[in-house]
Image (cartoon, rainbow, N blue to C red):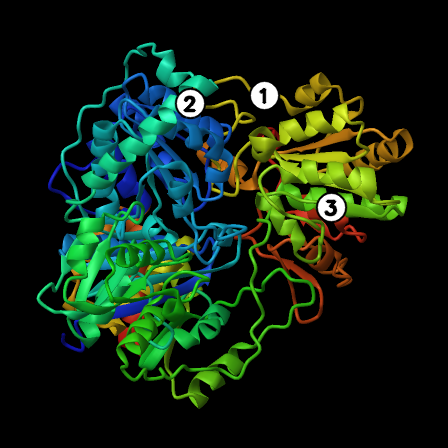
Amino acid sequence: MGINSKINIVIAGVGGQGIITLSKIIGDAAVKENVKVLVAETHGLSQRGGSVEVHLRIGDVYAPLVPKGEADILLSMELIEAARNIDYLNQNGIVITSDVILRPPIPGVKLPKKEEIVSEFERNNIKYYIIPTKDLSEKAGSYLSENMVLLGALYKLADLEKFISIDSIKESIKTMRNPEINLKAFELGSSFITGI
Amino acid sequence: MSNILQKPGSKVLLMGNEAIARGFIEAGGGFASAYPGTPSTEIVETLSEIANSLGIYVEWSVNEKVALESAYGASISNVRALAAMKHVGLNVAADALASISYTGVKSGLVIVSAEDPSMWSSQNEQDNRYYGMLTYVPVFDPSDPQEAKDLTKAAFDLSEKLSHPILMTPTTRVSHTRSNVILDEIKPPKTKGFFLKDNSRFGLVPANSRTLRDKLINKWNSIKESLENFEPYNRIENIENGKVAIIASGVSYQYAKEVLNEIGNYRLIKISTPYPLPKKFILKGLEDIKRALVIEELEPIVENQIKNIVNEEGLDTEIEGKSYVGYSGEMSLDRARKAIKEFLGIHVKQTNIKKLNLSIPNRPPSFCPGCPHRGTFYSLKRAVNSLMIKPIFSGDIGCYSLGINSPYDEQDIILEMGGSIGVANGLSHVAENQVPIAIIGDSTFYHAGIPGLVNAVYNKSPLLLLVLDNMTTAMTGEQPDPSSGITAMGEETKTINIAKIAEGIGVEKVVVFDPFNIKESTDKLKEVLSYVIKEKKPAVAIAKKACALNAVRIANKIKVEIPIYQILENKCTGCGICYNAFACPAIFVKDDRKAWIEPSLCTGCGVCVQTCPYDAIKPVKIIDKRWDSIWE
């Protein structure tokens, strides 16, 4: 089994941010390409504004869950959730995260600041990309397209091309409501990475 | 078109539960019933969406017991039927199940009990494979979505052939995993049949039951025999390799398979029928094997049966399992890897785990912005504080279980569906100078709450029953219930009025209030609590308001603009009541302690306006006249 015969992605976020939709888009595209995919979601209680994780595995894979320390990519719709799930990342793994911070509705809760999280990434030699998903989604036409901005960045940064063509991803996005906005968001996410 | 109806040969992405639904229609199923519960809900939810186009009958039953009884009724009238529930739901349906195995069935009857190891959304992680042993019902456990579909179809065929029910126990990682599924032909459903009377078989009076019990024992032998050749669901991989074997059941097979891909092709015995285990198949798998490790989640069901087989046959094969794998929680790749490597004496390398030096706050699920429960819990706290009483909040299963969290802390006990009222009944006769308040939702009240209320009236129990009626089964994703006025198949139906039920039972004090009105809610709750204390009788209060998720959906559909609220900077003093005591997730605190309402999260309920002592919250625009009626 070759070292790159599979890819492990952990997608994190807050219930309601659209990470299940995001993972379904990739899953659908993988099926179109006849590539084995496993998308395991943790919801139920968590859809009510709690932390949500989706484990996405592509290629020569059987087990639905990514173990701690074995994710190639940690993709997060929220910065604190990125920090929370850092233990999934493997030694060369990369973090792709939105810059959005959402406060958990707990009285008197203390939150780490963006700068603190970033400096911890750097102290641990973690390769990270922080994407202004909110700005870019509004530019695309709706703040509901933040997940597609992140998908655009993911496609540029992960080795997804080996498994799934960009056409299949775009075909999947076209099945969403408001395909134009979502496609534009995907492009903006991609070109943000190209522009770095 | 939904993936579930794609044509045969299509390769589609399906969630395990959707795959079970597809298996049902490929088997020509005509009747499906369920009570929603994570991780089982999507099975019947998927079927409800396609019921009219296929002409099948689908219902949300009032509870799991009724769901199973109904599916049984269809099966003995020659229509293939499925009943779905979460694992703890089978406790409710167990009374029916234990007797169904005595009468057997006619057309295929498959009961799906979705298991939840690790308790992602459940109160316990009981292993329902034990129900197979208890009730003489074969248990099938698929390992992935493709197999969930195929095994469902196989289960229907076998159930019909054996005239016996079959229990399927997919776990969360099968039910809630999406993967590649290749579809087969949809069989035209048979939806009407005929019940041929035979009360010596279907009427379980003791004389009949004694005869049927003996028949069941004999039948069980033929059931075991029929599972001996059950490929590809039970199969032996790498049979050319002897000495050691890994035996894996259900989803654990997928974990074991990946570990063996990493470390070498040891013999792998795949089990999809954890009970009863086919003996000859197991013996074939254990040929030339000195040591075997059983990988399964939760209890040692497969392990103990194999140990029995090995004992009976006088083999010297060493069987291991739980001593390497452990009991609690779901399977994971590192857990399977560690167990298999330790069993084989291979060094287990520690993975480097990255750790940030940050304190990261928990993010528990919370009531949605606009959730009427927030207003109810806020007012309930004001009412008990103002009466200076000592309440015991006897809680229940639903979104309102989240009232256990701060700042509400208004769920002292949570056991099981409908338990709030029964427990409060006991408390009311014993706990001195404390006032039991049972808190339950509409769907849970219909499910198992009504007998508790009858009991409280009959036994003169001084308790307050607070029903949070949001006209839906909200926690599992807004499935309609008897308060919704609509069926699973989208037909209009009677709304079953909870206040009238309470009055009919004989509750003398019943009030209904609007949880979006804090003053009215607090006053009414004070009134009923005072009544319970003074009259020493049960009372019922009903908080009636739509689930915010449904209200917002309707507003978007009929194009009513959601009236977003904002904080008036000059009036806000940063007192924190709206974000700390009322704790709406749409309200954020700024660096200067003043509040900020996030427009993308606000659902326009306007309750925060009433909690603000400084009149600092106002709607951004004039509110649409139709807005209030959306929440009724």
Foreground: B352 or B222?
B222
Disc 1 to disc 2, C-alpha distance? 37 Å
Assign a secondary structure to mark 2.
Answer: helix
Task: Give the labeled residue for mark 1.
Answer: B496
Q: Can you identify the residue that label 3 sits on?
A: B393
Residue B140 percent location from the top left of the image? 29, 44
Q: Amino acid at mark 3?
A: Phe
B615 horizontally vs B252: left or right: right
| Image quarter hosting the C terminus of chain B | top right
Instruction: Indicate the position of residue A31 as horizontal and vertical percent values.
Output: 18, 53
In which quarter of the view is residue B490 placed? top left
Mark 1 crowdedness (10 Å alpha carbons): few <14, some 14-19, many ≥20? some
Q: Amino acid at mark 1?
A: Ile
Horizontal side of residue A103 vs B383, given as left or right: left
Is disc 3 in the same subunit as disc 1?
A: yes
Q: To which quarter of the image does residue B471 belong?
A: top right
Q: Which residue is mark 2?
A: B209
* B363, B66: nearer the viewer: B66
**Is disc 3 surrounded by few (<14), some (14 to 19) or many (20+) residues within 10 Å?**
many
